[in-house]
């Protein structure tokens, strides 16, 4: 399972498929992230938490 920003959906699918893991669980956050404040990053993480947890425990 991996987390990336939504700018990289197509690249993530292509990469995981080329590595032999086409069904790898993935969670995408809003893009961009490099200029987000700490508070914004915490909000992104909070918003993705349930989906990440579900992906790693299913």
Image: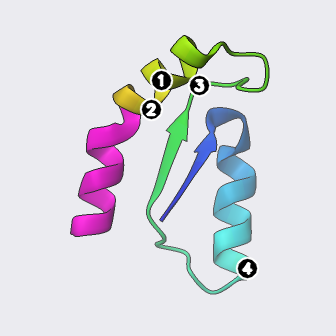
Instruction: Please give the label number shown on residue 18.
Output: 4
Q: Is residue 34 above or below residue 21?
A: above
Q: Earlier in the sequence, mark 1 or mark 3?
A: 3
**Is the Cβ of the residue at disc 1 closer than 8 Å to that at disc 2?**
yes
* Circle 2 residues within 10 Å: few <14, some 14–19, many ≥20: few
Q: Is residue 35 above or below residue 3?
A: above
Q: Which residues are magenta?
A: 48-58
Instruction: Please give the label number shown on residue 45.
Output: 2
Coordinates of residue 3 in the picture (x, y in percent): 55, 50
Callout 2: SS:
helix
Q: Compute the Cα span from label 1 to label 2.
A: 5 Å
Q: Compute the Cα span from label 3 to label 4.
A: 24 Å
Q: Which residue has dot 3 on it?
A: 30
Q: Compute the Cα span from label 4 to label 1.
A: 32 Å
At horizontal 33% and vertical 40% (from top left) the residue drawn is 49
In this view, the mark in front (2 or 3): 2
In this view, the mark in front (1 or 3): 1
Q: Which residue has dot 1 on it?
A: 42
Q: Earlier in the sequence, mark 2 or mark 3?
A: 3
């Amino acid at each position: 399972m991996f987390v990336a920003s939504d700018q990289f959906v197509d690249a993530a699918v292509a990469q995981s498929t080329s590595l032999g893991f086409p069904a790898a669980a993935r969670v995408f956050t809003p893009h961009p992230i490099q200029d987000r404040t700490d508070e914004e990053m915490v909000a992104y993480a909070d918003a993705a938490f349930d989906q990440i947890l579900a992906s790693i425990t299913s």
